[in-house]
């Protein structure tokens, strides 16, 4: 029986640097670290694996084929949006409401799209 997603992996030319960005900027923690791979854990327990990339590819745009963003859930949109801006995060979009949710898009240190989201009614 399939139980669900255990982790999502992304490749980076500098896995430790990207993992440290998630720790310092988004409050994740290092779950495990090896020479060429880091597992990081979000405050809600979600795991990401960051592996060493063998080559750098052009950064895809928001609507290109493939995985396009990781949604980062927050309990107070305005506070977290402002905290991230104050930390130097550059947002791709201004905050907006979509189906009753507050959202804004930004990129991590490697250019991957992240989606800041507050849902008054969680999906699950």
Image: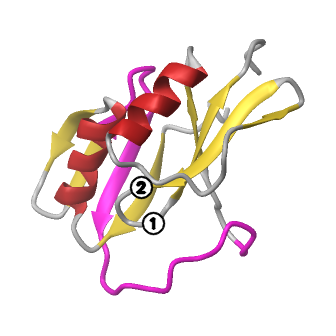
Q: Is residue 41 magenta?
A: yes
Q: Where's residue 111, x and y in %?
A: 45, 66
Majority SS type along the magenta span: loop
- Magenta range is 40-65
82 relative to 61 in the view: left or right = left
Q: Is residue 79 above or below residue 113?
A: above
Measured as percent of width and height from the top left, residue 7 is found at 46, 42
- Label placed on residue 111: 1
The answer to whether residue 83 is magenta is no
Q: Is mark 1 on a helix, strand or loop?
A: loop
Q: In this view, does 11 lie above or below 87?
A: below
* The N terminus sits in image quarter: top right
In the picture provided, is 2 more to the left or to the right than 20? Answer: right
Is disc 2 in contact with disc 1, using a CB cutoff of under 8 Å?
A: yes
Residue highlighted by disc 2: 108
Q: What element carries label 2?
A: loop
């Amino acid at each position: 029986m399939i139980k669900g997603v255990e982790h999502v992996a992304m490749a980076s030319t500098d896995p430790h640097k990207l993992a440290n960005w998630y720790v310092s900027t988004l409050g994740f923690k290092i779950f495990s670290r090896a020479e060429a791979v880091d597992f990081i854990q979000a405050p809600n327990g979600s795991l990401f694996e960051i592996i060493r990339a063998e080559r750098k590819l052009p950064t895809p745009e928001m609507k290109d084929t493939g995985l396009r963003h990781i949604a980062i859930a927050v309990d107070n949109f305005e506070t977290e949006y402002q905290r991230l801006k104050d930390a130097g995060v550059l947002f791709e979009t201004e905050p907006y409401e979509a189906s009753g949710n507050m959202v804004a898009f930004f990129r991590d240190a490697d250019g991957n799209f992240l989606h800041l989201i507050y849902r008054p009614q969680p999906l699950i």
